[in-house]
Amino acid sequence: MIAHLQRASHTAGLLEYLYGPGERGNHTNPRLIAGDGHGAPIEMLAQTDAPAYLAHALDAPADRLGTRAPERPVWVCSVRSDPRHPDPTDAQWAEAARRIVAATGIAPEGDPGACRWIAVRNQARQVHVVATLAREDGSLHNTYRDAFRLQTECHRIASELGHLPPAPRPTPRAQETHVPAPYITISSEPSGSVSAKGANDDLSATLLKHAGFQQIEDWYGRRHRLATTTPHAERVAIASHAADMLRAARYSVDLDPDLDTRRLTSPANPLGLYTAGAEVLQLTDQIRAAENGADLA
């Protein structure tokens, strides 16, 4: 599951969009699947003005704060599931929404002063959780580390739904020496970037990020790359440093020769890219020192 957090200023406008046709007309059967209005009957969706009513119910705690309310009091979390697996049911999405608001602290279970929230579905494989940052007790929800807690909980939910492969069993210590070293390739891409492929475990990922690589996680798994704007000298330095650390950790690393500083500045070639210039200077000195035609030849 992939989650995305945003902040909004106006609940009414956001709900009108969620309950509307959408920018591409892909919103179908918008419906409320879960929520907690702390006494406000948010399940009353038979009314034609349901979005306006829901906005009023969600905004009530923020309205009570007056000038103390933040400029963007609306907390919006959009969660998408892996399209390679069956779409969770409304009941499963509702349970996921409850776990998300509990894990992030928006609405911890059993907290009478928690924030008001709702979960809306308007298309397949996706749910939108909308909440107000104003709590019932008059305080404000602290959004610090919301993203970290959100991704952690989404990972747990995806694992329980069977959307992630099971964790490998721990290898007995007696067999560790017989396990082949993971193979990692660091190479240049046609775009000018540098990518590291094959680093699927946490240790190699940590070493690559420490060296300067950016980690990307999507439907294709975990990848590491350098931005195309990274200067060539810096790309070479980062790639070589990453390869050295990975090899020290007993990984098998295939490093592109153009990214290997040892190749560019080896003991037999200490001047690296300036070797040709050094050779010309040496020849010039020999010509100047020639005492006869034989020496000059």
Image (tube, rainbow, N blue to C red):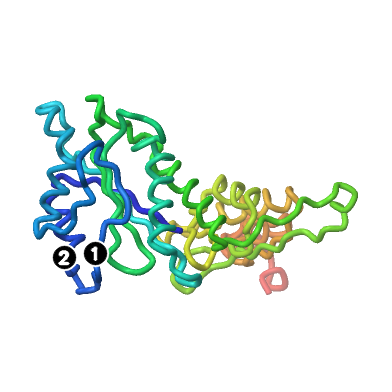
**Residue at x 13%, y 29% (from the top left corner):** 64
Amino acid, disc 2 = Gly
Q: Pick the residue in front: 24 or 278.
A: 24
- SS state under label 1: loop
87 vs 36: above or below: below
Task: Tell whether 277 sits left or right of 3.
Answer: right
Foreground label between 2 and 1: 1
Q: Is residue 82 visible?
A: yes
- SS state under label 2: loop
Q: Pick the residue in front: 173 or 51.
A: 51
Amino acid, disc 1 = Pro
**Residue at x 46%, y 66% (from the top left corner):** 82
Is the residue under label 1 in contact with that under label 2 (CB below 8 Å)? yes
Please name the residue that numbered disc 1 is placed on: 30
Task: Tell whether 145 sits left or right of 45.
Answer: right
Q: Residues within 10 Å of mark 1 (few under 14, many from 20)?
A: some
Please name the residue that numbered disc 2 is placed on: 20
Precedes in sequence: disc 2 or disc 1: 2
